[in-house]
Amino acid sequence: MTATQLLFKNRRPGETVFLSGYRATGGYHALARALREMSPDEIRQLVKASGLRGRGGAGFPTGIKWTFFPADKPNPKYLVCNCDEMEPGTYKDGELLRADPHQLVEGMIISAFALQTNVGYIFIRYAYEQQAQNLRRAIAEAKAAGYLGDNILGSGFDFELHVHGSAGRYILGEETALLNGLEGRRPNPRLKPPFPAVKGLFGRPTTVNNVETLANIPHIVTGGAHWFKDLALTVDGSGTKLYGLSGHLQVTECFELPVGIPLRQLVEEYGGGVWRDRKFKACLPGGASTPYLTAEHLDVALDFNSLEQVGSRFGTAGVTVFDDRTCMVAVTLNLIRFFARESCGWCTPCRDGLTMVRWLLETLETGQGSLEHLALLKEQLQNISGTSFCALAEGAMGPLAGLLNHFEQEIIDHIKTGRCPFDF
Amino acid sequence: MPTLTIDNQQVTVTQGTTVLEAAEKLGISVPHFCYHKALGAVGACRMCAVTVVEGSQKGLKMSCLIPAEEGMQVTTGDERSTSFRARVGEWLMLNHPHDCPVCDEGGECQLQEMTIASGHGIRRYGGKKRTYTNQDLGSFVVQEMNRCIQCYRCVRTYQDYCGGRDFGVMGSRNRVFFGRFQPGMLQSDFSGNIIDACPTGVLTDKTYRFKSRFWDLQEAPSICPHCSLGCATIPGGRLRELQRVRSGINPKTNGYFICDRGRFGSGYVNHPERPRQARSGDQKLEITAALRQLEQKARELTDTYGPEAVLLLGSNRASLESNWLLQRWAAELGCRMPLLSAHGPRHQAAQVAAFDCSDRLATLEQVRSSDLVVLFGADPLAEAPMLAVALRQVVRAGGSVIAYDPRPLELPCEFDHQALTPLQLHELLTAEKGPEVGRLSELLQQAQRPVLVGGGDLLGATGLLQLLKLAKRVSSLQRACLLHPLLGGANSFGAALLSPAEQDDLLTRLESGRVKMLVCLETDPLLEAPAGERFAGALARLDELVVFDYLPTPLSVHASLFLPTCAPVESAGTFVNNAGRMQRFAPVIEPGLPIAVTGGGDHPPREFSLATPGDQPRPAWQLLQWLRDDNRELAHVQQQMVVKLPRLDGLADLCAGDSGLRVRNVAERCVVVEDLPEQPAGTLQLVVSPARYGSDLGSRFSAKLTPRFAPAILRLHPQDATLLELQDGEQVVLDCELGSFKFRLQLSDQLAAGCALVENSAAFPHLLPGAVLSFCSVGSEVLHV
Amino acid sequence: MATEEEKQQVGYLDEEQIVEFIRHANQLEHPREMIIDVLRAIQKNHCWVPDEGIELTATILGLTPLEVEEVATFYDKIYRQPVGRYPIHICDSVCCWSRGGEQIANHLQQQLGIEMGQTSADGLFTLLPSCCLGSCGCAPGLMIDQCFHGHLTVESVDEMIEKLRQEATA
């Protein structure tokens, strides 16, 4: 493997690196440098210049998000790490925390310093119990070593960090729902504005960032903005990315590779090609909410802008591949079932619209559908897109749009034959 | 003040107005569910979508969420908006049962209206409907969850607005459930509001279940008679039965909601023992014959014995017009000026409100928008329930509430409670210096919109005057500190306003021996005068006792001449609320024995007659007009009143359902503040509070409220109980000036030490709130001889 | 591993835990944020959260039972109904589905003689469908006691069930 390894530099199969191992490869040097040599504003400018975009799925530039945060306002204000990684096909944060939890801790301390917040929370999903334990241990170690707590490394900066466990439900990944969940309220997304930077956790200014985003911060501080930006293979890209491979590939593992790597290279070189000597039919390029790519897109560079140009999204870079014996109606039905089940029940297009879509896909998949059902499905796509309260239903429309754009004929085949053509 | 164009019509609105509200201003009704004027916009239902053609955010947008912008162009009827709203209608109807024919909401169902308005008609969804098992929510509200469209209005009303903590939303996705943790009676004193808030038939009025179709119901705007706030209500009746009450809308008073006492306290109108027949002794009379008899006797007695012989007594239950006509009749008879209250101290307190505070009375709306409200001797849930909800809005908006009161107060919001005895309360009010006074004055001076709430019962006239002084002290040129006095009844202010300042009280007059005939207008001093027992004694010395009433009071049984009057819902009139707001109520139903009664709950009887059974009751004002030999209408009476009393300017122009009008201010009187009595050693201060339910006579005679009636208890601070060697739960005897009474003892460390607290209710009607500060002792029943 | 009876005796929270939770709650401006912590602790002791567990949580945090229930019922990993000793969360999301998750789920249902949402007659296993468990590279997978088991085959599942049965009777 020749790709530059930042986040996975300490990753060994079945092992977790704790303080001594982390320090042995330069851990907490960035923190010392940030606290001793840089001002909070310099760090914010650096992150902005690095071009780092949020790794949680939406890809919003981190440096710009931070400019919305009133760093000079009095505390309490909060830094929250979103580790509610629950989008099907996405497991990179879990892998990172399984291998090297201190990276997140260091990233959060530097970020908290940059944002001048004194309290941080890591909101972690129920299934990541091992990762939560890793983090608790890493936090305890960091505290004992003087990286957390009062007057960190003699800088006068204080920061305490808590791990908050969740109890399931995909919607908690939405940042305002997460804040409600963290407060012990029903985790419905909040109305925006006010945005979390103005009124977030407990009504105070808050920034929510993804695990991988925050873990990149120490590397940016160490290597600099230009170096980080140049790691990407695309002109407008920046940094490396954790690509989680899944589905019908020979190798389904998580790799750290440059942003902008072509899909074909990822599938063939790292995924070992499609399993069972079958052909590539389609993939979800960045988690369950991203529209499908097909074989014609194999040469697209995996980055935010390039994927948007082909009608999809980079998302979380969790790539799920489907072989040529897969029914895309069934795949979409599976995804819609997920989204409908994980709807928080707040707004109508999501709560009831997805129920309608699920029924339509069930009807079509079982061969009981008609062209009217197909028309109705298109009508649902048109009406749910852009009209829901938060991004959940919007995300559910990703695969549905992909299905209708690329695989309409497959739906018609279901209608014509009165059964799923892929049932053998 | 942006100007925008909606459907080619221009409208200018204030900054921050949403497009939905701007459209409403133009008369364009955009379909919506989750938006509610009092609850605000939450963007859940997505029904109010419109298309923004020009503006900072273009395309299909939720009109409840986007603010109006200068130059914005919006269409509500374009293809994209209408087809999307039709889809929302369809989505909302996925699970909704087709049970409109058996649903109580039918005809007043917003879901029916909005489904039609959205253009959805034919179900295309063929999947399974989700269903629920319903919960028993007690005797006020029926739940039918299958009909739910998840607009979250109920929980936003119950929890967010009214502060209830036992009803909410559970589950997620398309399985969310609105209900309680366990089945059972809703605990909030404002629970009935979820009936009004629910846009469809999920939460309906259990006491009204299957009684009427909305289109058959007779409704008219009215004023709640159960406390002095004067909340707007819309009672509904049919078949001569008052069947339900829902909230009216008055931004100046209640806003959009009412309390359960107001909603479920209307049963007195249909009370099975309500006297509906005029009679003299045991003899039934035609109403005119009864009036003739009264007129004759009153004139005879006045002529024979002089102006003292006939004593007319008005009340805070009677309308402003009736009370005024009573005064006119007295003048025409040549007898002394009527008393307009059987309860002297309450009346005097109301007079302080009506005369001395008139230029600084805060509406309930002003209370809601205050940033600091300080309560002195006021228990909102007992004396003026919707005030509690108003206080919650103060706290929700970041303001604060401080309460000085002996009682263990509960409020649906955070507040700072200082438990003071009545004497300590007066001391605090009269003190010019001291840490507590200093702290309080400072807070009040810092506040932008401070309001002082004074409980007329606990403070009395003396305390209210002190409160006025405090308000003046902390007022500045920039802003006044306002007052919000709580008074004894729906028309206490009105009765006080009509009365001269110096009047002796009812018992003094009766015990003088010169009164031969007492005429009680919609009042029963046995239940409504502070010393009911003494009054009972004085009754024996009367030659004639005449009662006008619509309630089955004990006094109506004693009456030598009885004249049935209409309940407020059966007549028109005006009440003046605690903040001096004149508000008109309109007749809802005609008086008469409910068909449910004449038919014994079965089919109406097939005996036909020209007369309606039980239709004898007449509006009190009409009876008084007859006695005055004047057959002109109420409007004429009101015009006359304005001429005689310029303070009532505008009275004649009021309409039922409008927001009412403040009486004109007058100059403050010169009242000498009375000294407080000394507390005898070894006594406790007696606090008599109204019970939340059944203290006002309307709610006491309403069977619907039975589940909320509380047994009589006496409360002491544990410290006092220890001194008196009394145990929680034991039977105790209260000894006071007015007698000895037995209670079960309950200890409460929230109560001010040094007090004994009892509640006036159906279970304990003997002591009344608002009496002059008095003292008592409490001892074990076992030791009591 | 405690037997079912022992677990019943342990109750919902032990005295020490209650004291610690109350101490912590008193330090917080918003004790509500501990709802999930307390519920998860109760579940750890008692397998699932009965009504009394909701009431206990409410008491500890100064909330009403309804306020706790509103939050508890939102999450699928808080069990408000009895579950077996080993609740099995079978991932049915797309990655596991694409690699035979459905067959594993069907096999488990057959082997245990129960449908999704039911508990086996011996009270040991409850089958619960779950969304993505975040180990998509190891699909198909399932989770028992917050422990992930991946790369499942019919044989490995049988083995796992057998092992848990033995563990339970040991």
Image (tube, coloured by chain):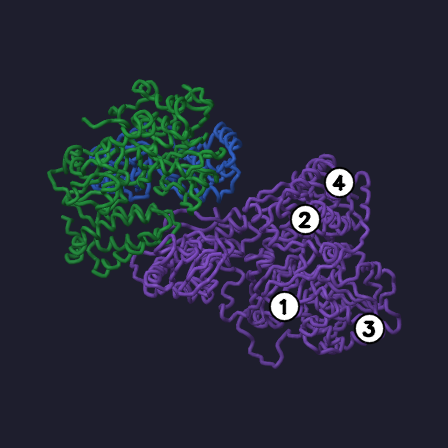
Q: Residue at x 75, y 78 (%)?
A: B629
**Marker disc for residue B477:** 2
Label at residue B127: none
Q: Is A255 on the left or on the right of B74, as rendered?
A: left
Q: Is residue A48 above or below residue B364?
A: above
- The numbered mark 3 sits on a residue in which chain? B
Instruction: Give the secondary structure at mark 2.
Output: loop
* Circle 3 residue: B333
Between marks 3 and 1 in the image, the one whose residue lies nearer the viewer: 1
Chain rendered purple = B
- Which residue does the numbered mark 1 point to in the structure image? B654
Q: Is residue C124 left or right of residue B389?
A: left
Using the image, tell me which numbered label, if any, was put on residue B432.
4
Closer mark to the observer between disc 3 and disc 4: 4
Disc 3 or 4, which lies upstream in sequence? Answer: 3
Q: Residue furthest left?
A: A277
The shade of chain A is green
Mark pair 2, 1: CA separation: 33 Å
At label 2, counting other C-alpha atoms closer than 10 Å, the crowd grade (few under 14, some 14-19, many 20 or more) is few
Mark 2 / mark 1, whichever is N-terminal = 2
The chain ID associated with circle 2 is B
Task: Indicate the colour of chain C.
Answer: blue
Identified by mark 4, the residue type is Glu
Give the alpha-carbon distance from disc 3 to disc 4, as whole Å: 50 Å
